[in-house]
Image (cartoon, rainbow, N blue to C red):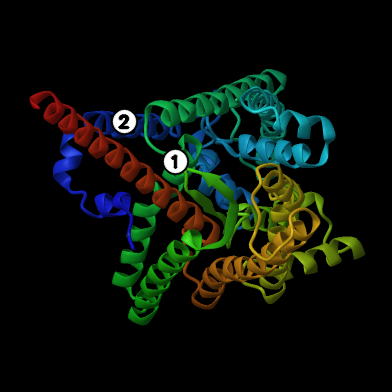
Amino acid sequence: MASRADNMTSNMSLANFSKATELKNRIWFTIGALIVFRFLSFVPLPGVNPLILSDLYDQTRGGILDLFNTFSGGSLERMSLIALGVMPYITASIVVQLAAALHPTLAALKKEGTVGRQKLNQYTRYGTVFLCAIQGWFLASGLESFGAQSGLQAVVDPGLMFRVGAVISLVGGTMFLLWLGEQITSRGIGNGVSLIIMAGIVAQFPTFVSNMASGYAEGSIATTILIGFIVMVVGLILLICFMERAQRRLLIQYPKRATQRGMMQADRSHLPLKLNTAGVIPPIFASSLLLLPLTITQFAGNSVDTNSGVGGTLQTVLQYLQHGQPLYMTLYAIGIIFFCFFYTAIVFNPEETAENLKKNGGFIPGIRPGRRTEEYLDYVLTRITVIGAIYLTFVCVVPEYMIAQTGVPLFLGGTSLLIVVNVTVDTISQIQSHLLAHQYGDLIKKAKLKGRLR
């Protein structure tokens, strides 16, 4: 039977939305912040020639830069102030999470509540600045050397001053994006950092549609291929929506407690376990590791001697690691499955969950508290992670296979599609929560008015 909150959610209409002034202000603030993000993506670094840079970037297609460029909304391709995007923050937060799960001192901080989380967030920001400085320095150095080897000079005045200026600009751009994301989270709607990543991905959608339409008009893309892509994208979106909302709910029962009427009543609740606990981390890690050798070789350029034994072997391996090759897709699938289990084991701790249940007097019916509960949680989590790993592998490998068979570049790869759908679903859920809270507020006001009339 549906609860009263579920019934109210299903009865929500645009009339309720028009009355929610605070929600509308939050949505307008979020849209304004994302517009600022898009404007910044077109502001180039000082000392960079954007026209020559676009020619140089075309020579590095297919590497890890394409992945980062997608998440930054094309900012890396234009070498803007926010070329690094929020990826250093994502990397730093993942490292801090892993360290908090493995290091005893950080694990104790994690258990301290709000103060501990603020300390971990501070460490994450320090790590973000450090990673931005390192990546910015290597990016500026690689831009100078790469342009010189190609016969094109994207940097107007290469040297130490350009590198220092580029590092300062890139660190400032990334930290401004973090501040903008925090403002969206507190004063807007949805998760700010996730919305910035999604906005960068969706910003390339008009270009993709235009290329597909022009290719179809010129006859380079057949009608069956176009229909197949549309069916695939719609099918993957429906699958992602279903699987990301899927949960394995474990029944938790608490001891009987006396009510106000003197009756004994047992409390029950559920422990929700998502089928995809790892989220989008496994595809990002797997694709980054596979594309890293290709990117290094592209930046090395003519310094690699293909006539030598090592150079020839490296060139052969890189040919097999190209997009769409069987070896690439096999290693990609294996990497996703590995990181699914690895990251899930880091994020979810069955021993800690079982201990918390035991302290609060809760237990799973038929399972003894303590060690047996920990083993049962690990048993269930392992089996649902198998389903989640298969689902992630399918969603990420199918677009790669379609691209390899048709030769049509699809801007929405598996990872990008996962991010867009997850952030959209989460934002819609938060909008529904605000509408539900507004509707409850109206009911409380009406109840107070009726009480006064009496």
Q: Would residue 106 appear left or right of 225 to someone viewing this image?
A: right
Residue placed under numbered mark 1 in the picture: 195
In this orientation, which residue lies closer to the viewer: 404 or 350?
350
Q: Would residue 380 appear left or right of 454 to someone viewing this image?
A: right
Question: x, y percentage for residue 236?
Answer: 45, 68
Amino acid type of the residue that numbered disc 2 sits on in the rendered structure: Arg
The reply to whether discs 1 and 2 touch (Cβ–Cβ < 8 Å) is no
In this orientation, which residue lies closer to the viewer: 76 or 357?
357
Amino acid type of the residue that numbered disc 1 sits on in the rendered structure: Leu
Question: x, y percentage for residue 280?
Answer: 58, 54
Question: x, y percentage for residue 410?
Answer: 47, 63
Q: Residue furthest bottom?
A: 224
- Tag 1, which secondary structure? helix
Q: Quadrant of residue 183?
A: top left
- Residue drawn at x 20%, y 34% is 442
* Marking on residue 26: 2
Examine the rendered structure and indicate whether residue 271 appears above or below residue 87. Answer: below
In this orientation, which residue lies closer to the viewer: 205 or 53?
205
Q: Earlier in the sequence, mark 1 or mark 2?
A: 2
Answer yes or no: is residue 220 visible.
no
- Tag 2, which secondary structure? helix
Q: Quadrant of residue 327?
A: bottom right
Q: Would residue 47 appear left or right of 22 to someone viewing this image?
A: right
